[in-house]
Image (cartoon, rainbow, N blue to C red):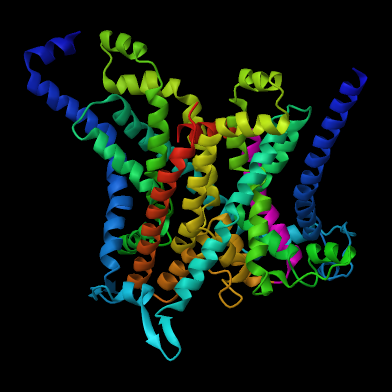
Amino acid sequence: MISAVSRKTWGAASWYLVLILGAISMVIPLFWMASTSLKETGAVFEYPPKWLPVPAVWHNYVEAWKAVPFGMFYINSIVIAVAQTFGVLLTSSMAAFAFARLHFPGRNKLFVLYLGTLMIPSAVTMIPTFVLMRWLGWINTYEALIIPGIFTAYGTFLLRQFFLGVPTDLEDAARIDGCNKLGIYWNIILPLAKPAMATLGVFTFIGSWNNFMWPLIMANDLEMMTLPIGLAAFQNTYRTDWNLLMAASVMVMIPSILVFLFGQRYFVEGIKLGGIKG
Amino acid sequence: MPTEIQEIRNPKSGIRRDLFTTLLFLLPNLLGFLAFTVGPVLASLLLSFTVWDLLTWPPKFCGFDNFVELLGFRRGSAGWEANDPRFWQYMWNTVFYMFFIPVSMGLSLGMALLFNRKLPGVVAFRTLYFLPTICSAVSMAVLWKWLYNADFGLINFLLAKIGIQGPEWLDSVAWAKPAIAIMGLWAGLGGFNTILYLAALQDVSRDLQDAASIDGANAWQRFLYVTWPSISPTTFFVFIMSVIGGFQGGFLQAFMMTGGGPAGATTTIDYYIYNKAYAWLKMGSASAIAWVLFIVVFVVTLINWRFGEEKVEYV
């Protein structure tokens, strides 16, 4: 009996040891980032390096903030991510409703076409879409940064799977009461699909926030850049100013971390949903 | 009930109204889908048979020249040589990163097994391990470029402490790719795949596990004969998605950390396409590479599907 208990304790202790070792490998790089971001320029190139920034130079953040229009980057990132999230939720849920609940000729064939495009590398559509944006005169505009990203096959697929799982009893009752399709979509399906919508919303927001290649091609003016592209531009100018680079990176990271901490539940649920139904 | 009656009286107008409703729901997404996915895919195929610098209109038709230039071989002074040796180098780089997919999946499964033990405080660890996934990948790239700095980087400093002279990492032809792959393993340790595995583990039947224990199976045997088969659909899904993603990987790392160097050692196919199109304005040639990539992804996914489905056990 005693040996069984002590075996269990040792077991738990060794699991913790592995967890803690892994956690150290997570924390040290992030700690190093924060530490470097507060060092004096001279202290960055000290050898051996010091773990703590003494004195802590908070001014680095001010300097990084002023070096490029960081305020604009934040605004652009927020505008684009919010607009894309709403756009994706609206168009995906409507199309998903059509695929899950309406009958029309060629429905299944069209859906297979949607599914098939999930495998297409983004590099394939990138060049013609770029040409289209150029032809429309949309380079360096919010239109180009937002609109091509709001018609996703993935979102339609995810929500359709969820809608199919919603029992039809309620809708039948509503139809008998004279409710039309629009009413069913808005008053019954959408409220029931809140978890799936929240999941798709969080995914879309983070995906848009971290998107790199498309805004890199679309935004050449500093004023139109998003945070990741702004950071890339910043790096171009301040190649070896590691303290400023780290300060800028921390500023880019913080909003994602905040969104994650608030939406953590939806994240975990959403990854499960997307994976299992996929 | 009035709608029902109307439909019975005049079925034609009912069908027409149904179609109108359908279009109302479908069109916003469908039009965008046609304009930004289907249309561009077809346009890209057409462009791949042309020479075009974006500035002169129209693109010049050139038949299969782009594909021959990309994939063909010619007899050179020293036997057969590729028309575009860079393409093969960059394809190799892309595949090199993909060799780490099984390692990454193994680590994810290991982490998921740890998280699944319901130890007190495990959720805090899970959150911590998920941070690199959530943080902007650009920030992570800048951070690791600093960590890998040969002279002042933290990694070589720590290695020196245990008596190892660290390599030049991102500046070394031999180490640049492994360095970027290691960063990927680190970032993926507690990422999406780990959470997928964790979800799968939570669905493994308790009864089967207990039955195996009663029959005298040890922990490893329980894992091998109960857990592993039960989570095989997840393994299959993660593998297929990782391969599709892997063929398109490495762009951000090349752009932010190495510029694709040294000597092209970290240029992947995606970065090559980007440079062809936007640095050298060879839109036709870039489209041809993109289509070759598409076909490779398609064929490999079909093969995975064909051979993977047999091994998956749906419980």
Q: Is residue B130 above or below residue B51?
A: above
Front-most of residues B268 and B99: B99
- Residue A15: image x %, image y %? 80, 35
Front-most of residues B160 and A134: B160
Left or right: residue A27 compared with residue B62:
right
Front-most of residues A170 and A116: A116
- Residue B172: image x %, image y %? 68, 74
Q: Residue at horizontal 44%, vertical 48%?
A: B304
Q: Is residue B201 above or below residue B102?
A: above
Q: Residue at horizontal 37%, vertical 24%?
A: A164
Query: In the rendered image, which quarter is residue A234 located in?
Result: bottom right
Q: Residue at horizontal 39%, vertical 43%?
A: A152
Front-most of residues A38 and B198: B198
Query: In the rendered image, which quarter is residue B159 located in?
Result: bottom right
Identify the main secondary structure in magenta.
Answer: helix
Q: Residue at horizontal 30%, vertical 11%?
A: A172
- Range of magenta residues: A240-265
- Residue A90: image x %, image y %? 38, 35
